[in-house]
Image (cartoon, rainbow, N blue to C red):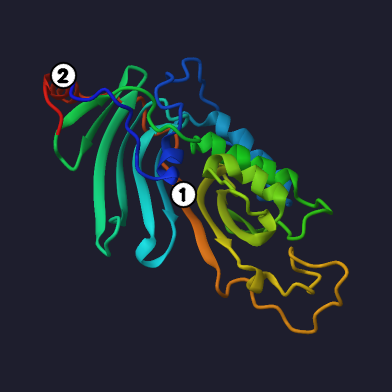
């Protein structure tokens, strides 16, 4: 008899974004291997060209190792979740350890939880803090899908904005050896729209202009695979974004005289909303994930809940 019949719902919205609703949809049966791109770095001189190539190369990836960290808040209120492991690029199977940490409600104490999980198209099995394996019904997460393919699709949409005259901040590209680095820092709504799905971004009444998004992504130019990505999202108060008469402020009064007082730097008094760190490796070196029989046997032998 199985021990639980509820979906494995990890405790933060950011955690839900890690696994997504594709957790048990079945592996891509017709995937075929394609040799990595060996186009020279000079053929991808713009962010759009580079990120389009990265998006195209995702079709070659069947499996990979991932380390994904989401953090929200700061200081004593900071909470986070880290997922480390390996599996299918579309999250149809995998073996991961999920570590959650956060402040205990109403106290200054912090709690940490480790959950080991296996999943494929037959089910999802979890072991929380070494208490034993149980089968979880439903989806692997319940939120937006932060699969590799979704992340690089978002980057492709970001690249399509490169050179757009309506962007307030530029999308920049630099090269060093076999690594190309894409950077962006700003509050453009088009960038927000491109990144909101894989990172589960929600404004909740706040405009993009009241925030700053900072992104840095590294690409292996020999394979055109994304290897590392760092993203931060901060909220600024009106006093930080500028005074009411400041024409650069999103709160500006068009009828007021421009302020002669300098506005505060955006990094001052900013409230961290979200931090994301992604690292990918071992592309097409993993193979299908098989759930150990002993995991299934232990889950089927459980008769009571914790």
Q: Nearer the viewer, residue 286 or 188?
A: 188
**Residue 301 versus residue 163 in the image, above or below:** above
- x then y, percent, for residue 301: 11, 20
Q: Dot 1, crowdedness within 10 Å: few (<14), some or many (≥20)?
A: many
Name the residue that disc number 1 marks. 278
Say whether residue 296 is left or right of residue 39: left
- Residue 123 numbered tag: none
- Residue at 31% across / 43% down in the picture? 98
Q: Residue at x 35, y 24 (%)?
A: 288
Specify whether residue 44 is in view. no
Give the structural element (helix, strand or loop) at label 1: strand
| CA distance separating discs 2 and 1 | 34 Å
Residue 243 place in picture, x, y as percent: 72, 75
Name the residue at 31% across, 20% down. 123
Q: Quadrant of residue 268?
A: bottom right
Looking at the image, residue 132 lies above or below residue 258? above
Residue that mark 2 sits on: 300
| Residue 6 in the figure: left or right of residue 181 | left
Few, some or many C-alpha atoms within 10 Å of disc 2 (few <14, some 14-19, many ≥20)? some
125 or 158: nearer the eye?
125
Vertical placement of residue 302 versus 225, above or below: above
The quadrant the N terminus occupies is: top left
Residue drawn at x 74%, y 43% as measured from the top left: 160
Q: Is residue 210 shown left or right of residue 198?
A: right
Depth-wise, is mark 2 or mark 1 nearer the camera? 2
Percent position of residue 108, x then y: 27, 65
**Can residue 32 be seen by looking at this rendering?**
yes
The picture quadrant where one finds residue 241 is: bottom right
Q: Secondary structure at mark 2?
A: helix
Q: Quadrant of residue 127?
A: top left
Q: Position of residue 86 (x, y in %)?
A: 36, 37
User: In which quadrant will I find the C terminus?
Assistant: top left
């Amino acid at each position: 008899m199985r021990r639980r019949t509820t979906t494995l719902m990890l405790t933060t919205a950011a955690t839900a974004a890690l696994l997504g609703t594709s957790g048990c949809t079945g592996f891509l049966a017709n995937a075929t291997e394609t040799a990595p791109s060996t186009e020279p770095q000079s053929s991808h001189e713009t962010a759009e060209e580079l990120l389009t190539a990265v998006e195209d190369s995702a079709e070659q990836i069947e499996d990979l190792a991932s380390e994904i960290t989401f953090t929200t808040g700061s200081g004593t209120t900071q909470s986070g979740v880290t997922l480390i492991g390996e599996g299918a690029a579309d999250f149809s199977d995998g073996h991961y350890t999920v570590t959650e940490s956060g402040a205990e409600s109403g106290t200054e104490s912090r709690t940490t939880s480790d959950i080991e999980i296996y999943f494929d198209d037959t089910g999802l099995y979890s072991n929380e803090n070494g208490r034993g394996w149980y089968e979880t019904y439903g989806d692997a997460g319940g939120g937006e899908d932060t699969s590799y393919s979704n992340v690089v699709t978002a980057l492709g949409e970001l690249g399509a904005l490169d050179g757009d005259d309506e962007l307030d901040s530029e999308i920049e590209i630099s090269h060093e050896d076999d690594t190309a680095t894409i950077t962006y820092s700003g509050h453009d709504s088009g960038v927000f729209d491109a990144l909101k799905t894989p990172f589960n971004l929600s404004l909740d009444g706040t405009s993009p202009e009241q925030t700053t998004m900072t992104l840095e992504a590294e690409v292996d130019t020999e394979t055109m695979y994304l290897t590392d990505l760092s993203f931060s999202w901060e909220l600024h108060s009106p006093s930080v974004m500028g005074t009411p008469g400041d024409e650069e402020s999103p709160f500006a009064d068009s009828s007021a005289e421009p302020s002669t007082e300098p506005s505060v730097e955006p990094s001052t008094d900013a409230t961290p909303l979200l931090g994301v760190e992604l690292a990918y490796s071992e592309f097409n070196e993993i193979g299908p994930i098989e759930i150990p029989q002993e995991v299934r046997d232990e889950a089927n032998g459980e008769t009571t809940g914790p």
